[in-house]
Amino acid sequence: QVQLVESGGGLVQPGGSLRLSCAASGSIFRINTMGWYRQAPGKQRELVARIDSGDSTDYEDSVKGRFTISRDNAMNTVSLQMNSLKPADTGIYYCNADITTVTRVAITSWGQGTQVTVSS
């Protein structure tokens, strides 16, 4: 019914940059909050950044000043610009969205995840 597709992960050296993108499609009436989560090996999934429908943002403390989340409501996309990457940023990054469907049902949708590896 609703699908989130991520792109942009990969291998980067410490101090480098990556940009993740996520596109939502399907039976969407409205997209509310969109966000990015990550899961490092052996750890729980954690919130990295989120942006609401009014463009208010929240960031996990360790990424403040380095990551920037943005959204394009016309295209139903959310992006995460990641600068000054550190090995601790390594993990699988998941796109997340709180969506109201065309049948006015509220759902939470997840992408399939994209691997980010920061290593020299």
Image: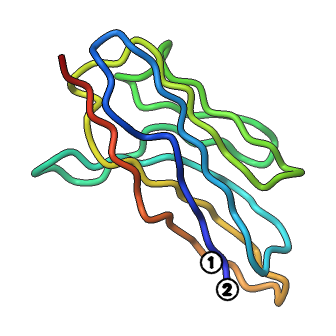
Q: Position of residue 44 (x, y in %)?
A: 22, 54
Q: Which residue sits furthest right?
A: 74
Residue at image coords 51%, 38%: 49
Q: Looking at the picture, does residue 54 appear above or below residue 69?
A: below
Tell me how the rendering is colored.
rainbow
Q: Residues within 10 Å of mark 1 (few under 14, many from 20)?
A: few
Above-or-below relation of 21 to 45? above
Tell me the crowding category of disc 2: few under 14, some 14 to 19, or many 20 or more residues within 10 angstroms, Cα based: few
Element on which disc 1 rests: strand
Where does the image place residue 62, in percent across and percent down from the top left? Answer: 34, 22
**Residue type (three-letter) at the residue carrying disc 2:** Gln
Q: Which residue type carries mark 1?
A: Ile
Residue 78 in the figure: left or right of residue 10: right
Report the number of discs. 2
Question: Dot 2: what SS?
Answer: loop
State the image quarter where residue 1 is shown: bottom right
Among the two numbered marks 2 and 1 on one chain, the one whose residue lies closer to the N terminus: 2
Q: Whole-percent x and y of residue 88?
A: 22, 27
Q: Which residue is mark 2?
A: 1
Q: Is 72 on the left or on the right of 106, as rendered?
A: right
Residue shown at 21% from the left, 45% from the top? 40
Residue at image location 78% in from the left, 81% down from the top? 27
Foreground pick, 114 / 105: 114
| Cβ–Cβ under 8 Å for marks 2 and 1 | yes
> Mark 2 against mark 1, which lies toward the viewer?
2
Single out the residue that lies furthest toward the bottom.
103
**Apparent side of residue 9 relative to residue 15 in the rendered image (left or right):** right
Q: CA distance from mark 2 to mark 1?
A: 10 Å
Residue with the mark numbered 1: 107
Of the 4 image quadrants, the one containing the C terminus is top left
